[in-house]
């Protein structure tokens, strides 16, 4: 999984009825775009360090480079 600042991280709920979480990647810890990422969660407006699991995917921002 590779991302750039401005991309969205989407984490699907792990149980039926769980909401999906969507956040914007605001910082990278590796120059190659691999995790972990600092993510600002849209629904809560707070930031956390995230190591995405198998239920996560990246939605690339139009201005971010494709990797």
Image (cartoon, rainbow, N blue to C red):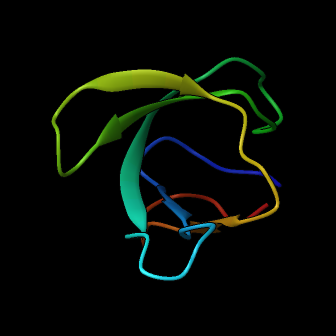
Where does the image place residue 16, in percent across and percent down from the top left?
A: 53, 82
Decide: is 14 above or below 6: below
Between 8 and 33, the residue placed more toward the observer is: 8
The furthest residue to the front = 16
Residue 63 horizontal side relative to residue 42, left or right: right
Q: Quadrant of residue 1?
A: bottom right
Relative horizontal placement of residue 19, taking residue 51 as reference (left or right): left
The quadrant where residue 57 appears: bottom right
| Residue 64 point in image, percent of width and height | 52, 58
- Relative image position of residue 22 (x, y in whole percent): 38, 59
Up the image or down, 13 lies above or below 50; here it is below
Is 40 or 16 nearer to us in this picture?
A: 16
Q: Is residue 15 placed above or below 51 in the rendered structure? A: below
Question: Residue 27: x percent and y percent?
Answer: 50, 25
Residue lying at 72% horizontally and 33% vertically, measured from the top left: 51
Give the residue at x 59% y 72%. 15
Quarter holding the C terminus? bottom right
Judging depth in this view, the residue of 44 and 27 nearest the camera is: 44
For the point 44% across and 22% down, which residue is it?
Answer: 48
């Amino acid at each position: 999984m590779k991302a750039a600042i401005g991309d969205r991280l989407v984490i699907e709920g792990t149980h039926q009825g769980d909401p999906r979480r969507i956040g914007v990647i605001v910082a990278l810890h590796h120059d190659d775009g691999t995790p972990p990422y600092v993510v600002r969660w849209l629904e809560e407006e707070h930031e956390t360090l995230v190591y995405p699991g198998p239920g996560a995917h990246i939605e690339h921002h139009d201005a971010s480079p494709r990797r």
